[in-house]
Image: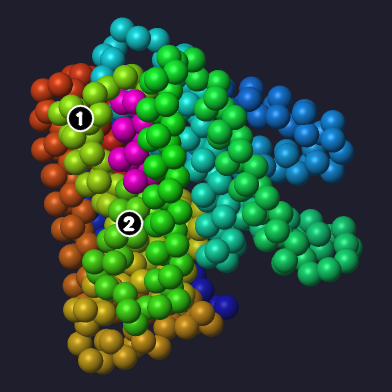
Amino acid sequence: MANDAVAGDALRAPPARPAVGDDPVRAVLAAYTKDLVTGVDDTLTAFLAAEVDTLTEIDAAMGGFAATARDCVLAGGKRVRPTFAYWGWRGVVGGAEPMAPVLPPLAALELLHTFALVHDDVMDASATRRGRPAAHVAAAAQHAAAGHRGDSRRFGEAVAVLIGDLCMVWADRLLSHTALPPARLLDVRRCYDQMRVETVAGQYLDVLGENDPANWSVDRALRVARYKTASYTVQRPLLFGAALAGGDVDGPLVAAYTRYGLAVGEAFQLCDDLLGVYGDPATTGKPAGDDLRTGKPTALLMLARQLAGPAQRRALDRIGADAGDREIARLAELVADTGAVDRVERMISDRVAEALAALDAPSIDGTARTALTGLAVATTNRRA
């Protein structure tokens, strides 16, 4: 449409948020993260090459399927979860221990993340992921291009479910490569399993909220953020890292990680809520405004409804999946006009402050404290 560019520009104008912290912290963080991300990616590449070869022996078509799953894992991503897990581990052991022995379990978290993303895209009917067609969309296109029988959309969804399932199995298999004493490995496994259960709980609540918005609230939206995002993005990876290091589950360090992880994880999701409405698709890799089209009951939209006047609430209630870009752009402005964006910005800042206060625990390694400070800033003040 002729006015799409204008509408897109309106969506791509997220409110500015001043950074907490300073540039030297970010520079120190980037220097450490580079080596970690390289190690995780190298571990994944080697592991997945062997797995794809094994599945290719079953059938040539299986090789293509496995290669698609591999590509979903390796197609970009910030490696946020392995990064938090690494600093959770490093905060216990300090700087003298080599990173190589913990790379398999850290990389396993990225496989778990891919499982969640691929399934989430099916549930949300998302067209893109990381700037590329989502797995179910790509598989549907391949089905149609090949002229196969049946419904291409259903085929694509079925393939994506299997890709997610395979990534979950791969995560378990790579985790089993961890060389630790049995008792410690059991603690690691308990943390890992709890993370997976909480992820499913949060995802179910997310799906339920979209189908029962009349019974949703800001509190329930924050509960989704806590379990769908905070748990498996920040809190549990930190505790997973501490378990890898043999940290005391009842000690002050784990208590500090829990407090920090919940605060940063919730702020991370609140930032995602803003990006879902105001983000630049070229940066986020996903269409802008989808949360508005679907009426997804995020904390941002729940606050907008709570703060809206009667006319604004009627406009919000008219949101529909068939809304055009210009209408979505106007709704984005309306959401900001209610004061909801400013309120979410304050909620993010309050949670970052809470997280930084948690890092005052004296038992945290100094370099890890610096890195976690930088991570609290970088993951909640981002464009993607």
The three-letter amino acid code for the residue at tag 1 is Asp
Classify residue 291 by image quadrant.
Answer: bottom left
Residue segment shown in magenta: 231-243
Classify residue 203 by image quadrant.
Answer: bottom left
How far is disc 1 from disc 2 in space, using C-alphas? 25 Å
Point 28% across, 15% down: residue: 93
Q: Specify whether residue 282 is in view.
A: no
Q: Specify whether residue 92 is in view.
A: yes
Task: Give the foreground label among 1 and 2.
Answer: 1
Residue 185 sits above or below residue 4 on the image: above
Point 37% across, 28% down: residue: 187
On the image, the x and y values in percent for residue 280 come to: 43, 58
The three-letter amino acid code for the residue at tag 2 is Ala
Q: Is residue 234 magenta?
A: yes
Q: Is residue 234 left or right of residue 285?
A: left
Per the image, the residue denoted by label 2 is: 225
Q: Is residue 168 left or right of residue 265?
A: right
Point 45% across, 62% down: residue: 204
Mark 1 or mark 2: name the one nearer the start of the chain.
Answer: 2
Point 89% across, 63% down: residue: 147
Per the image, the residue denoted by label 1 is: 250
On the image, the x and y values in percent for residue 309 come to: 20, 87
Q: Nearer the viewer, residue 190 or 375?
A: 190
**Contact between labelled residues 2 and 1, with CB atoms less than 8 Å apart:** no
Classify residue 166 by image quadrant.
Answer: top right
